Image (tube, rainbow, N blue to C red):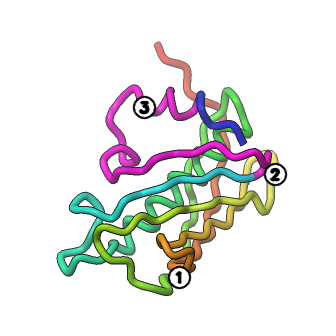
Amino acid sequence: MDIQQIKETIGKRPNLSSALGMELISTPEPDTCMAKMKVDERNRQPFGFLSGGASLALAENLAGVGSLALCPGKISVGINVSGSHLLAVEEGDTVTAKARLMHKGRTLHQWLVEIENGAGELVCSVQVTNYVLNARKND
């Protein structure tokens, strides 16, 4: 999925993706997209591990980008995010998230996002449901 245009659009102003250090990545498959995020002071808990909230934010942001790429001229908002944290990730490591579209309806998209550590181990599995709607017109 080519997400380059979405990256440029959302990169024009500060947002959660940039604040947490997410790097969005296009993929050759039409129903997947990826992101990387280095575990550092922006997204770790006080004990030096990746925050579970940061993992869920990574998944929701990535699935949202995927829905935007699939529906030009629309916006998408996450309406349900549910994840299981399986392994801790230490500061200094980099996680890679791969989002795969499971269902594409007119208004609902269901994504499965799997997050792996630098060793390729599954650290978090997240399901994201996005609601797709018309963009508001600016006055």
- Residue type at mark 3? Gly
Q: Which residue is mark 1?
A: 84
Between 52 and 106, the one lying in front of the other is: 52
Q: Name the residue: 66% across, 33% down.
A: 74
Q: CA distance from mark 1 to mark 3?
A: 29 Å
**How far across and how far down the image is residue 79, in percent?**
57, 59
105 versus 50 height, above or below: above
User: Between disc 2 and disc 1, whose residue precedes?
Assistant: 1
Mark 2–mark 1 CB contact (< 8 Å): no
Q: Amino acid at mark 1?
A: Ser
Q: Which residue is mark 3?
A: 11
Does 20 sit left or right of 134 as displayed? Answer: left
Looking at the image, residue 37 lies above or below residue 68: below
| Label 3 to label 2: alpha-carbon separation | 27 Å
Q: Looking at the picture, tell me which residue is in the foreground, 118 or 98.
A: 118
Counting from the top left corner in percent of width and height, residue 76 is at 60, 44
Q: What's the residue type where badge 2 is placed?
A: Gly
Query: Magenta span has 38?
Result: no
